[in-house]
Image (tube, helix red, strand yellow):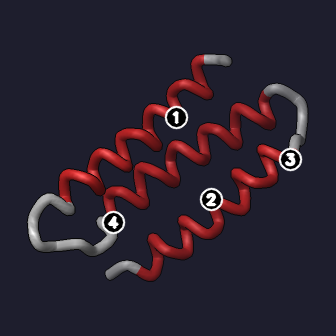
Amino acid sequence: MGYMTIAGLLLITAGWAIQFYAMKGKDKSIQKNFVLVNCLGIAILIFDGFNSGALTDAAIGNILTLVASGAVYLKIK
């Protein structure tokens, strides 16, 4: 596992931490920062996948996840 993969996964984990701590109060909505940090982590995983020279099922799944997360980001006010 390369450093780019670890960086992407750490960003995704940080996004979940942001969402978790934001939900400790009464606000249970999806946080825009959560989605943004999550998208950045997924983008790094996609870049790392293409940089390794292989378009795998995981890379395609990451692309679909990034598109869906990006749509959520644009939908949040």
Mark 2 closeness class: few <14, some 14–19, many ≥20 residues within 10 Å: many
Look at the numbered disc 3 and give the secondary structure of its residue: helix
Percent across and percent down for residue 5 are: 61, 28
Q: Which residue is mark 3?
A: 57
In the rendered structure, the answer to whether residue 15 lies left or right of residue 66 reads left
Mark 4 closeness class: few <14, some 14–19, many ≥20 residues within 10 Å: some
| Residue in the image at 14% along x and 59% along y | 24
**Marks 4,2: beta carbons within 8 A:** no
| Residue in the image at 59% along x and 47% along y | 42
Q: Which residue is mark 2?
A: 66
Percent across and percent down for residue 15 are: 37, 48
In the image, is residue 35 above or below residue 10? below
* Distance Cα–Cα, label 3 vs label 1: 17 Å
Look at the numbered disc 1 and give the secondary structure of its residue: helix
* Earlier residue among tags 4 and 2: 4
Q: Which residue is mark 4?
A: 32
* Front label number (3 vs 2): 3
In the rendered structure, the answer to whether residue 75 lies left or right of residue 32 reads right
**Marks 4,3: beta carbons within 8 A:** no
* Earlier residue among tags 4 and 3: 4
Percent across and percent down for residue 25 are: 9, 65
Identify which amino acid the numbered label 1 is placed on: Leu
* Earlier residue among tags 4 and 1: 1
Q: Which residue is mark 1?
A: 9
Mark 3 closeness class: few <14, some 14–19, many ≥20 residues within 10 Å: few
Identify which amino acid the numbered label 2 is placed on: Leu
In the rendered structure, the answer to whether residue 45 lies left or right of residue 70 reads right
